[in-house]
């Protein structure tokens, strides 16, 4: 079940990377790399920071295949992909819910402080997009206008709050994941964004 | 004592990151991340390169708290922070003196060549700013016009030169740190910069 | 023999970095760092991803010396370096042939999947240039118009294909390296590039 969500999230992330790379007029190799980095970049940074190497995409070849197929699909059907926008957004949103939890769990296994675990969850879910934007020579979009990391952080806080209560671990996990997803959906639906801070 | 300097340096680095992020019109999350990365980025890269993981900010939660409080402070008082410019510059300068030595010591513990140790010291002190500038889509300022890394390198050279003499380790440490600080202060006061190299 | 090729490749990579940094009007420190990063960045990323730390340039000081001398040479003779363009291109091309194989071998030692090994070879050969371009605030050139990574990938595929046959390991290695070099030379000579993908 988790594995399927992971694959769906990977597909959504890879396709989002491919579309950005096409906009930047990259060649086939550049497009593939940006798709790849968007999909695995967050988990890679997480693994590097905690020292879990070789990083995870190197140990399970399935993700490489999924990303290559997704990239080819996105390139071929690039003009029709708008019709999939809703599905992709849903995959992406469910994906970040899961990735947040994967990052938190990896942090717990490494016996790190809850705040650091939440940071790892957020990194897993959102830094693929950050690396994508840097490689495309843009200021990362999640630093400017998206409720994205905030959803991950709120999900993480939910997770550690509920753990204080006598609730089964599985349930806590699912609730926290749902919080990430719901916050993100609400923020997008009602166009809620974090305030910017302006120089006075 | 060292710990207090470390905290003061972290505060100065975090605030410098926050101010750059505000200039770039980032949202609250972006500002916090840039503050965080500026403060811990150099030490993180050092830890990754020598394989000392989980990286150090993950093992001592104090720094996370210090950075969050500094970031909030900098956001709230952003219009008045000019009055603190001198204090912040001093914290920053003392901070890089210390960070250079921390990096060198980590290199020594890993039994690396003195030149590599100096490189690690310089990375610790200056790559937080490099990562900050990359995330803000700028060419890193220390590659263009600041005597910053040069101060770290001179401090490192001093350290390894003095070690050849029968001087107590503590004293060598303090002198090397002072060299970093003095070189940086002089360079800023007299507007000394490294020469650029122009295409003929 | 391999060591000499490695040194020649390092020289070519370092000089290419220095020339880009001069174009960007960096100061001496910036130029040195960009030269350094271009030369060792790919191998560093490879070592981080598989967890082989301290990363390799930290364990063999020779490369640091070679890069510093190359950088000084390139700065001093920057107006005459055009005469060396052909030699440098050859060094660079032979270098990526070797680096691809070094990356593949490191992947094999870590018992990774052949596709991951090829990815590691490509990263070793081409990500120094990617990091160089990011530090210089450009979209990496190999994502846009160079047959570079493609040559590495074809060499890697050759390597794993030939391993199926009863051919001596050394011979397989040399043929694969030659494939990288020949593909790159042909692509440059006949101005072959990967197709870009345009939005319809």
Image (cartoon, coloured by chain):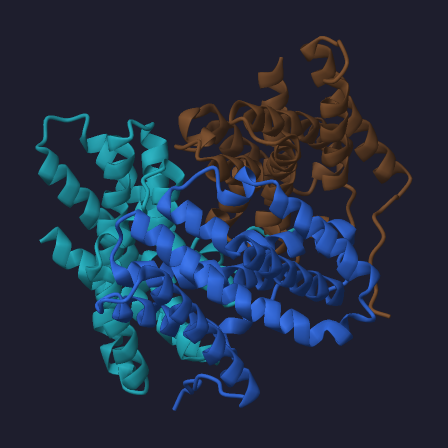
Chain colours: A cyan, B brown, C blue
Q: Position of residue B2 (x, y in %)?
A: 61, 16
Q: In this view of the protein, which residue sits in the foreground, A187 or B135?
A: B135
Which residue is found at the position 32% from the left and 39% from the top? A52
B16 or A75: which is nearer to us? Answer: A75
Q: Is residue B55 visible?
A: yes
| Outermost residue, right side | B190
**C164 is higher (above) or lower (below) than A75:** above
Residue in the image at 56% along x and 87% along y: C189
Does the image show residue A137?
A: no
Classify residue B88 by image quadrant.
Answer: top right
Q: Nearer the viewer, residue B10 or B200?
A: B200
Horizontally, residue A121 falls left or right of residue C133, namely left
Please state the horizontal and vertical placement of residue C161, each as a whole percent of the image: 26, 71
Q: Is residue B123 left or right of residue A156?
A: right
Task: Using the image, determine if residue A28 lies above or below residue B142.
Answer: below
Residue in view at x 32 percent, y 87 percent: A79
Question: Does C111 sit left or right of B1 as displayed?
Answer: left
Residue visible at 65% across and 40% down in the picture: B126
């Amino acid at each position: 079940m988790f594995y399927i969500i992971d694959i769906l999230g990977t597909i959504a992330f890879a396709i989002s990377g491919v579309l950005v790379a096409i906009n930047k007029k990259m060649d086939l190799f550049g497009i593939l790399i940006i798709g790849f980095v968007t999909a695995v970049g967050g988990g890679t940074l997480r693994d590097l920071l905690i020292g879990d190497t070789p990083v995870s995409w190197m140990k399970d070849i399935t993700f490489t295949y999924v990303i290559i197929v997704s990239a080819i699909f996105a390139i071929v059907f690039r003009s029709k992909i708008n019709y999939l926008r809703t599905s992709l957004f849903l995959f992406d949103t469910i994906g970040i819910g899961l990735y947040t939890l994967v990052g938190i769990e990896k942090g717990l296994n490494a016996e790190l402080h809850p705040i650091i675990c939440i940071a790892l969850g957020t990194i897993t879910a959102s830094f693929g997009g950050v690396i994508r934007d840097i490689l495309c020579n843009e200021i990362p979009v999640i630093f400017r206008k998206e409720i994205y990391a905030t959803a991950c952080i709120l999900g993480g806080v939910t997770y550690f709050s509920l753990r204080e209560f006598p609730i089964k671990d599985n349930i806590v996990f699912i609730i926290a994941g749902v919080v990430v997803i719901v916050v993100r959906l609400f923020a997008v639906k009602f166009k809620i964004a974090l305030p910017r801070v302006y120089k006075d």
